[in-house]
Image (tube, rainbow, N blue to C red):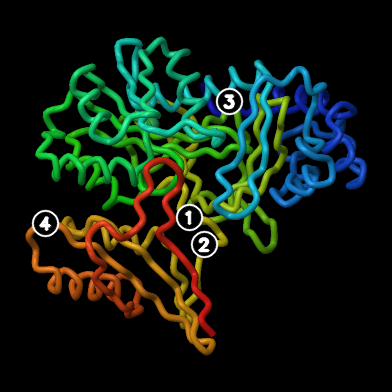
Amino acid sequence: MPREQLQVLQLEKLQKLLARLDGTNRFYTRKWKEAGVNTAAIRSLADLSKLPFTTKTELMRSQEECPPFGTNLTFPEHHYTRLHQTSGTTGTPLRVLDTDESWRWWGQCWAHVMSGAGVTKDDRIMLAFSFGPFIGFWAAVEGAQQMGAMMIPSGGWDSVQRLQAMRDLSVTVVCCTPTYALRLAEIARDEHFDLKALPVRALIHAGEPGANVPRTKQRIQSEWGAKCFDHGGASEVGAHSFECELQPGGTHVIETEFIVEVLDSESGRTVNPGETGELVITNLGRPGFPVIRYRTGDLVRLNVTPCECGRTFARFDGGLLGRADDMVTIRGVNIYPTAIENVVRQFASVDEFCVMVTTKRQMQDLEIQIEVGGGDNAEQVRSGVEQAVHHAISLRPTVTLAPRGTLVRDTGGKARRFRRLDAS
Ligand SMILES: [Zn+2]
């Protein structure tokens, strides 16, 4: 669809949604009234900026004040058929509710993710994930169903059982976190299981950065002998971006279902394509639990040039680049966790790592613990990592060796490799 036509569709969907919410959704009706805006005045996409931002804090507060679901509901409670909650890595989880209509929409978005990875009805998709309240790959189940592919849940299986099932059932696509894809590769090595002999040709990742970190992606691809696809989304927003088979170095935004704005976090002004800013997103197909101009805290760089795959959807160059609040400044140097990950993953014998920013007497330091497997000389690897990180971010870290198997490996949720310790 030509971009002009895409924008006409976005505006049409936006206007319909706003009309539906105004007067029925308590959260937004109150919010817009307080801001003194009339939704009927939104006559162009540019007018969207007249509406106030939505923050996670506001959604959380509405659930505290009006438990258990808050006021961001457009329909009576009995219309809702699904409850999920955010993973809670940054505090109390936020509950999200979906109606049948909104849940089908989630599935449609995931169908975009899957068709981007070349999935067809002939595929067998294993979801290597422990299904719980986190929305994680639940929507992938719906997406697989809409694609007509075979979905194989593996929640109760351990890693070895999952590997065996991939072989025995001829699994072609695996959905999991990037951390877990690497963990499975590590287990396969220990068990002398030939990962590359599996018919798996694609891995679809979500839940955390990794598939967009070039070295991590490269490592997953070479361990599995399969292509690895990034995807971006959030419980409170939806699955909004995905990688196409040509992998042009970023993820496409599903612009038929979302309106994205990339803003300077401080001033709130729109940044130019190619410049890094905060992703502010409006979902168009989830009237049951909508977010209008939601501040995601994710940093992105928009690219609107056409992709050779033929899609006219804009792209996030490099996927989600990190979170605005993940950035740490140590002695004047701005550091993003993904930049460190990209360096550490160059070292094939580093199985796991953990980064800590420690503060002692107002002095901040960067400490990296690594677990070294394989037959490599551990001390050589340690000093190699130290030098490579120093070279990449212009700051010398303290790198130490951790005994094998001691650093946290996450099998399902979000890996927490980055910590801040305040020892002052
Ligand atoms: Zn493309």
The picture quadrant where one finds residue 190 is top left
Find out whether the residues at labels 1 and 2 contact each other: C-beta distance under 8 Å: yes
Find out whether the residues at labels 2 and 4 contact each other: C-beta distance under 8 Å: no
Vertical comparison of 380 with 242: above or below:
below
Q: Of circles 1 and 3, which is in front?
A: 1
List the residue tagged with mark 4.
374
Q: Is residue 329 left or right of residue 184?
A: right
Check disc 3 and give the amino acid type. Answer: Thr
Q: CA distance from mark 1 to mark 2?
A: 7 Å
Mark identifier at residue 326 = 2
Rendering quadrant holding ligand 1: top left
Q: Residue at x 61, y 32 (%)?
A: 84
Looking at the image, the residue that sits furthest to the bottom is 361
Q: CA distance from mark 1 to mark 4?
A: 30 Å
Q: Is residue 235 left or right of residue 307?
A: right
Vertical comparison of 402 with 97: above or below:
below
Residue 377: give x, y in percent of width and height. 9, 68
Find out whether the residues at labels 1 and 3 contact each other: C-beta distance under 8 Å: no
The picture quadrant where one finds residue 187 is top left
Q: Residue at x 83, y 30 (%)?
A: 25
Check disc 4 and give the amino acid type. Answer: Gly
List the residue tagged with mark 1.
322
Nearest to the observer: residue 149 or residue 93: 93
Q: Is mark 4 within 8 Å of ligand 1?
A: no
List the residue tagged with mark 3.
256
